[in-house]
């Protein structure tokens, strides 16, 4: 086999296993940290962008209020109702592509005598705006033109005389419902028009049962109101102008959520990513650099005599330097691959165990609801991040080469006779 | 032909200056066998290193005539040119063999060839031939630690010869060998000299030095006496 810089360098690393492994471990952990933090933060960001993108909205607007008194069908959580006529104005705005609303309710069951049945759990009901299904909690499938979430049956009819409902798979399973059965909300029976997959729903204003907005308003009994607005803006739109317009119309105390705000509201993760991660990462980077630099300097010092031999047989300074840098490049490469794999594994474990709850205002499930979990949690899905792979390699190789550069320069300038006198 | 002219070398040891060579002048004709003989600290190894371009003098010159080139002063060469001079024109043999422990015998012999990629095929075949001549072909893939001292020194000689240098510099080459093995090594050096290589041997062993055609006796950094040996008998 031809010997060249790479296999000479490899032999040297193999010979000094402990030192090489320590350096690789140090750099590898640094890459692991970086890759796992960035992979997780990106996955979390995507997870929290999910509800907004699934709703098709750039802005979700709500008006905080006080919890209202108990009634048979009440507003979920503590939002103030907003009149639906606002939508008409918003739809006229040149920067708004689509505007829609929903009304989320808790419908408490009644017994046979028309009295509240406290032994049964409330049903989470969301009224959806059938006038514009491009945005909102339930959207039609772009490809099929039908509602993608309906896996059995049909989307709700626009005929106001028909009381129809969509129920989630989980709710249907618990209550043994199928298409065509009736689901009772307060004193009305609604025919199950379709079954929907909660995994595909926007998790904002997620419910167990979906009815048309007018029928939800009828259940609530307080006029043409909604509690959540969805706005899709044109790319060139100025969200701040829309926000101030909304505040003028609906009051200054509006809660306006964008995907980045959702991230911050939900977990404060953006803060972690942007400040703690950077500060922590820099400290770790500096420590690893110091560790590897010291290790490299010690390794090069130990090899003074060998360097002397190479120079004696006619290697130029640059050729000796090239050998040392090749060794460190290999170390960096191994650390980069190992660190990336380990970082991905750590991220995978996190993704499997993470429970990312949406802010309560966006998904107001009563604690005692039957099917809380699927809709209140954002799913963390990992993606292959080629730029992180490159970043991991680059980081470890740069650390390794930077750490070796000084030692390599120093050793390459040794006089061969001086080097041979060592040891 | 090598011409050493008023060569001096002073080392600094703390605040003290130590003169290892004091204005040494010497001619080494091409194809000669010169033995530098003297006690430890007499300056013979330092002189060898100056001739081999391993170190730079603090005074004087080492003029070398290279094939198809003008006479050059080693003291005036750049670091890279000195490295090329060592690679292409000089072979070194040391008392401690100085083999690289992680490489096999064959690889050790080929280490000087690594920067000369275009020579690889030719020199790989030559290295195998050298191992055969030195009766080490069967051990080509062994590591130095698996060899005896004499075998290691033979490998070091093969490494010194791989780029076919005109000059071989041997610093106490038999210092760590038993008498029988030492005789083999000396025999090899004499054979190489008879094939046209210029040999400069540094030793404290007068008996070994007697194998050289010329003896330069060094004391305290100076050549105190030059001595011609009668033609050697094998």
Image (spheres, coloured by chain):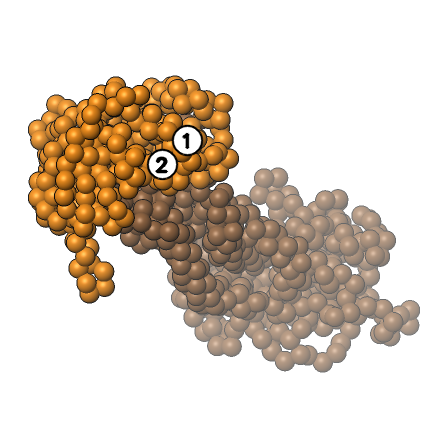
Callout 2: SS? loop
Q: In the picture, which quadrant includes the C terminus of chain B?
A: top left
Is A340 situated left or right of A74 in this image?
Answer: left
Which circle marks residue B174 in the picture?
A: 2
Residue found at x 50% / y 54%: A22
Residue found at x 61% / y 44%: A141
Which lettered chain is shown in orange?
Answer: B
> For this rendering, which residue is in front, B150 or B131?
B150
In the image, residue B137 lies at what x, y percent?
46, 22
* Label 1, label 2: how far apart the Cα atoms are: 8 Å
Q: Quadrant of residue B166?
A: top left
Which circle marks residue A207 in the picture?
A: none
- Please, is residue A34 above or below residue A16 in the view? below
Which circle marks residue B181 in the picture?
A: 1
Q: Is residue A83 visible?
A: no
Q: Residues within 10 Å of mark 2 (few under 14, many from 20)?
A: many
> For this rendering, which residue is in front, A6 or A415?
A415
Q: Is residue B58 visible?
A: yes
- Please, is residue A40 above or below residue B85 in the view? below
> For this rendering, which residue is in front, A303 or A35?
A303
In the image, residue A250 lies at what x, y percent?
51, 73
> For this rendering, which residue is in front, A178 or B113?
B113
Is B98 situated left or right of A255 in this image?
Answer: left
Which lettered chain is shown in brown?
Answer: A
């Amino acid at each position: 086999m031809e010997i060249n810089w790479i296999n000479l360098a490899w032999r040297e690393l193999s010979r000094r296993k402990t030192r090489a492994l320590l350096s690789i471990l140090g750099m590898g952990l640094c890459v692991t940290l970086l890759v796992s933090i960035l992979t997780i933060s990106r996955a979390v960001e995507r997870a929290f962008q999910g509800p907004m993108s699934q709703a098709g909205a750039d802005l979700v607007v709500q008006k905080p209020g006080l919890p209202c008194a108990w009634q048979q069908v009440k507003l979920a959580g503590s939002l103030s109702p907003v009149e639906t006529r606002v939508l008409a104005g918003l739809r006229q705005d040149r920067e708004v592509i689509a505007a829609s609303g929903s009304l989320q309710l808790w419908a408490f069951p009644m017994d046979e005598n028309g009295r509240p049945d406290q032994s049964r759990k409330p049903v989470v009901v969301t009224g959806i705006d059938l006038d514009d299904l491009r945005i909102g909690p339930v959207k039609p499938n772009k490809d099929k033109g039908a509602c993608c979430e309906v896996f059995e049956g049909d989307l709700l009819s626009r005929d106001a005389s028909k009381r129809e409902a969509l129920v989630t798979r989980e709710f249907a399973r618990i209550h043994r419902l199928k298409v065509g059965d009736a689901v009772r909300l307060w004193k009305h029976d609604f025919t199950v028009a379709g079954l929907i997959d909660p995994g595909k729903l926007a998790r904002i204003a997620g419910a167990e049962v979906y009815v048309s907005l007018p029928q939800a308003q009828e259940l609530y009994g307080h006029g043409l109101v909604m509690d959540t607005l969805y706005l899709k803006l044109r790319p060139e739109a100025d969200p701040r102008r829309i926000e101030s317009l909304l505040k003028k119309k609906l009051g200054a105390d509006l809660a306006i959520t964008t995907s980045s705000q959702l991230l911050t509201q939900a977990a404060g993760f953006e803060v972690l990513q942007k400040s703690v991660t950077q500060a922590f990462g820099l400290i770790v980077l500096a420590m690893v650099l110091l560790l590897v630099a010291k290790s490299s300097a010690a390794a090069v010092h130990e090899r003074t005599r060998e360097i002397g031999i190479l120079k004696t047989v006619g290697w130029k300074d640059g050729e000796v330097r090239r050998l040392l840098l090749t060794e460190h490049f290999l170390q960096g490469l191994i650390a980069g691959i190992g660190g990336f794999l380990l970082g991905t594994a750590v991220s995978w474990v996190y993704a499997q165990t993470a429970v990312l709850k949406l802010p309560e205002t966006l998904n107001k499930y009563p604690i005692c609801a039957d099917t809380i979990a699927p809709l209140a949690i954002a799913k963390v899905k990992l993606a292959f991040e080629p730029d992180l792979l490159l970043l991991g390699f680059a980081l470890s190789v740069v650390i390794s080469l930077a750490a070796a550069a000084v030692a390599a320069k120093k050793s390459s300038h040794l006089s061969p006779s001086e080097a041979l006198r060592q040891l | 032909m090598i011409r050493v002219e008023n060569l001096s070398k002073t080392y600094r040891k703390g605040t003290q200056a130590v003169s290892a060579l004091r204005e040494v002048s010497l001619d080494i004709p091409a194809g000669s066998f010169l033995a530098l003989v003297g006690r430890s600290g007499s300056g013979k190894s330092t002189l060898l290193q100056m001739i081999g371009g391993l170190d730079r003098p603090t005074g004087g010159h080492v003029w070398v005539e290279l094939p198809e080139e003008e006479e050059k002063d080693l003291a005036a060469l750049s670091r890279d040119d000195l490295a090329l001079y060592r690679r292409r024109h000089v072979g070194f043999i040391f008392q401690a063999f100085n083999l690289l422990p992680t490489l096999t015998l064959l690889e050790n012999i080929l280490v000087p060839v690594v920067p000369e990629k275009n020579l690889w095929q030719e020199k790989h075949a030559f290295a195998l031939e050298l191992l055969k001549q030195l009766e080490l072909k069967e051990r080509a893939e062994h590591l130095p630690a698996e060899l005896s001292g004499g075998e290691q020194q033979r490998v070091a000689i093969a490494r010194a010869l791989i780029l076919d240098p005109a000059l071989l510099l041997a610093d106490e080459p038999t210092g760590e060998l038993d008498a029988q093995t030492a005789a083999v090594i000396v025999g090899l050096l004499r054979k190489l000299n008879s094939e046209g290589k210029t040999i400069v041997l540094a030793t404290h062993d007068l008996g070994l030095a007697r194998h050289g055609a010329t003896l330069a006796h060094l004391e305290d950094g100076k050549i105190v006496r030059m001595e011609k040996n009668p033609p050697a008998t094998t």
